[in-house]
Image (cartoon, coloured by chain):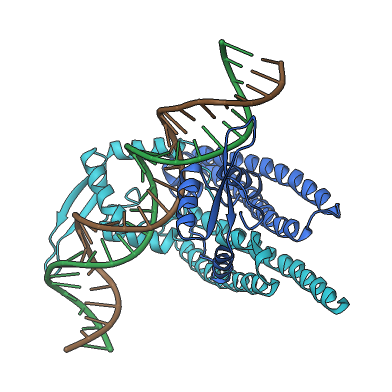
Chain colours: A blue, B cyan, C green, D brown
Amino acid sequence: MLSFEPMSGYEIKKRFDNSIAHFWQENYGRIYPVLSQLEAEGLVTKKTEHTEGMRSRNIYSITDEGTANLREWLLLPAEPPTLRIELLLKLFFGHAVPVANMIAKVEDEKRSCGQILQTFARVEEHLKSVGKHPDVCDENIRFGLITLRYGQSYYQAVSQWCDETLQTLAECAGEKNLEIEEE
Amino acid sequence: MLSFEPMSGYEIKKRFDNSIAHFWQENYGRIYPVLSQLEAEGLVTKKTEHTEGMRSRNIYSITDEGTANLREWLLLPAEPPTLRIELLLKLFFGHAVPVANMIAKVEDEKRSCGQILQTFARVEEHLKSVGKHPDVCDENIRFGLITLRYGQSYYQAVSQWCDETLQTLAECAGEKNLEIEEE
DNA sequence: GCGCCCATGTAACTAGTTACATGATTCA
DNA sequence: TGAATCATGTAACTAGTTACATGGGCGC
């Protein structure tokens, strides 16, 4: 984050929260210790800023060594994420409860995908309108849009999977009713 | 896993590895301690099996209380997964390195998606052929297929996102070259 | 005065991974 | 004979989250 501009730990957290929270999150419990560590390694420098009428803030800046280190890390291959999707775990053991419960879960999931996609659509509009101003460097906007599009693809896919799954489960429930009628 | 049939810790691990590893993984470091814990809580029972010519195995079975507990857990809402996708993190800070490097990363990602999808296709064929035999309970097969389809939707979406992103980044690289020519 | 935002930090805790130790059997 | 698979378990470690403590400024 400091490669964009110097800022405080508090601002770093805010940046995470309102730009990439959908695929990466950090909390104060990590940010502050890591900043101290980076300072000790000479990758960032701290300057305490005393503005009148405000409590003092620690503004961190990336050093040349820090930038070199960032570049090195960027070139390293990215670790593939290990997924842990509790909804799927529950579906996998779905045989132990009535199908109706699983249907409800998938419906919930579809609803929440819809909500997330609405939020993303608003963020997309916002990013695009900001990108039109000639005073902002639109390379960062571009990368922002790329990561946003990942989220959109992902939740669209999940939403479609929900539709398909609901159909499958409905058939399943139909067969069950048939069995009951036959008895 | 014990809700399917009684088995040993070793077999539980194998079940994870060759059925739901793509969205949930467990290792011995968790399995054995959790089994002891569940036993202490009366949710599973242990029977040590001595088969001649084989080392003894601890076979765990789920108790009625355990089944009740499982059902309770299944009805609880599933926690939405917190994504941590390093590739996106690197793309987000992509401004710090030449675009070509990011293009390479996305190409790698697309390749690995393709490989995973091939594996999934084979697993799908296998599940479907097993499901045709009348001696297997195909309700579990159905739930297995549902979770597999999630993986397929997901990696297809990522693969499409890769294509789209490669186009965006190519345009980006094009503009850069233009700038160089203009200089 | 109350709640919210700014701001920094630590301690305790939970979760999850990896490495290690041990040892039998089976198959090439 | 050596590698692979079966089999169980612990210890150490890394990662990540939550809760707490502290306190100033600002608007209603």
Place of residue A99 in the rendered image (x, y in percent of width and height, measured from the top left): 51, 41
- Which residue is found at the position 68% from the left and 40% from the top? A115
- Give the left or right position of residue A166, taking residue B26 as reference: right
- Which residue is found at the position 86% from the left and 55% from the top? A134
- Give the left or right position of residue A54, taking residue A141 as reference: left
Foreground residue among B128 and A37: A37
Place of residue B132 in the rendered image (x, y in percent of width and height, measured from the top left): 49, 63
Q: Relative to A55, does residue B98 appear above or below in the rendering?
A: below
Place of residue B114 in the rendered image (x, y in percent of width and height, measured from the top left): 60, 72
Q: Quadrant of residue B179?
A: bottom right
- Which residue is found at the position 55% from the left and 40% from the top? A105
Place of residue B177 in the rendered image (x, y in percent of width and height, measured from the top left): 81, 76
Foreground residue among A67 and B19: A67
In the image as oriented, which residue stretches furthest toward the right? B182
Foreground residue among A32 and A45: A45
Which image quarter is the N terminus of chain A in?
Answer: bottom right
The answer to whether any part of residue A179 appears in the image is no
Q: Relative to A4, does residue A54 appear above or below in the rendering?
A: above
